[in-house]
């Protein structure tokens, strides 16, 4: 909303107008001040009841995603609530009235805003006074960013390069260790004191196995070469599963061969021995009887499965009237 005018008049923002047009509804505004205080009492009462019932005391969460998940669970439980004087649940009442609502459009409305910040020499972008890391290859370039209410997406053309949870406090930063590996490979001495390493330890991606391999590599090859060996192992995470890499590092430590090549060999072996993911058995997706084993439909077999066509042949006799029609103005 750009401006609140007299009475129910409003100067609406362009994004709000687009949102209403996408979902096909009209907005009705309350009178500002005490004259319109009673017009939205039911909404404010229900919001206060929800807050007092479920959000007092304030839930302790680590991320906004965790809070949203908790609220989603609360919403599902609210469907089983029976209002005073009613015999059925709130979820059942909504189910019986849902047909009276306008169906949602097939595509969702994108509420995020698009920005084009420049990547600084620290491989970070600054969005709304918060800092997010991006891959080092974008240093000095402008990248396209989609800022949503709970996350930030960075694009290279149409491909999503990275996704960060949105930060809310001024000056906060979010660093991913993977984005700095090419830089740290040239300057391994900066690895120990990097903020990206602190973040990786906090979120659990840099595990105790990584710590043990790093310590063994520095003891065997020295600080610089040992750190480079660890960085080469971290680069393997881009194309191999994390569990397989951890098993490969553990095997390399047991064998006393602290090199990235040994870790890669052992990780491939662990990945090959890992059980395949369970298949999704869906009987509804069975191929029709006229489909060949290769998945290609045979038109001959398909026609044999169709019923006999007893419809009469089409006629073009009604076009004959065009041959006898005379132009206007002639006898």
Image (cartoon, grey):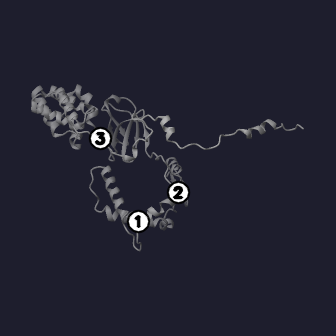
Q: Label 1, on which residue?
A: 90
Q: Which residue is mark 2?
A: 27
Q: Which mark is residue 243?
A: none
Dots 2, 1 in contact, CB < 8 A: no
Q: Secondary structure at mark 1?
A: helix
Q: Nearer the viewer, mark 2 or mark 1?
A: 1
| Towards the viewer: 118 or 44 | 44
Above or below 9: residue 214: above
Which SS class for mark 2?
loop
Q: Mark 2 to mark 3: distance in Å? A: 38 Å
Q: Is residue 283 visible?
A: yes
Q: Could you say whether the residue bearing mark 3 is in a helix, strand or loop?
A: strand
Q: Nearer the viewer, mark 3 or mark 1?
A: 1
Q: Is residue 189 visible?
A: no
Q: Quadrant of residue 145?
A: top left
| Image mark for residue 174 | 3
Closer to the chain start, of discs 2 and 3, is 2
Kindly report the distance in space between the C-alpha atoms of the residues bearing marks 2 and 1. 25 Å
- Residue 77 position in % (x across, y down): 34, 62
Viewed as shown, does residue 242 lie left or right of 287?
A: left
Q: Residue at x 38, y 29 (%)?
A: 141
Is residue 113 shown left or right of residue 53?
right
- Across and down, in percent, residue 128 comes to 38, 43
Residue at the right extreme of this rendering: 331
Q: Residue at x 35, y 56 (%)?
A: 72
Check whether the beta carbons of the residues at disc 3 and disc 1 lie within 8 A of each other: no
């Amino acid at each position: 909303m750009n401006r609140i005018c007299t009475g129910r008049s409003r100067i609406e923002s362009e994004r709000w107008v687009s949102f209403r047009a996408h979902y096909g509804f009209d907005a009705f505004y309350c009178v500002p001040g005490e004259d319109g205080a009673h017009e939205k009492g039911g909404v404010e009462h229900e919001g206060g009841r929800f807050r007092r019932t479920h959000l007092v005391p304030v839930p302790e969460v680590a991320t906004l995603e965790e809070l949203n998940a908790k609220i989603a669970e609360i919403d599902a439980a609210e469907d089983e609530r029976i209002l005073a004087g009613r015999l059925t649940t709130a979820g059942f009442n909504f189910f019986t009235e849902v047909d009276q609502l306008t169906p949602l459009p097939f595509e969702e409305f994108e509420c995020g805003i698009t920005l084009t910040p420049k990547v600084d020499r620290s491989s970070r972008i600054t969005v709304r006074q918060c800092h997010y890391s991006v891959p080092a290859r974008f240093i000095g370039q402008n990248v396209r960013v989609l800022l949503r209410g709970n996350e930030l997406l960075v694009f290279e053309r149409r491909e999503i390069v990275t996704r960060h949870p949105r930060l809310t406090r001024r000056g906060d930063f979010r660093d991913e260790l993977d984005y700095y590996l090419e830089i740290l490979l040239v300057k391994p001495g900066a690895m120990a004191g990097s903020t990206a390493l602190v973040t990786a330890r906090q979120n659990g991606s840099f595990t105790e196995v990584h710590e043990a391999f790093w310590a063994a590599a520095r003891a065997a090859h020295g600080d610089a070469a040992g750190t480079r060996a660890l960085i080469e192992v971290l680069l393997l995470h881009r194309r191999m599963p994390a569990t397989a890499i951890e098993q490969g590092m553990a095997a390399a430590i047991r064998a006393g061969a602290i090199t990235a090549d040994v870790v890669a060999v052992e990780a491939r072996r662990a990945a090959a021995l890992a059980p395949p993911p369970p298949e999704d058995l869906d009987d509804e997706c069975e191929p029709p009887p006229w489909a060949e084993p290769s998945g290609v439909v045979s038109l001959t077999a398909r026609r044999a499965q169709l019923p006999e066509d007893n419809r009469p042949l089409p006629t073009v006799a009604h076009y004959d009237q065009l041959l006898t029609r005379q132009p206007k103005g002639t006898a």
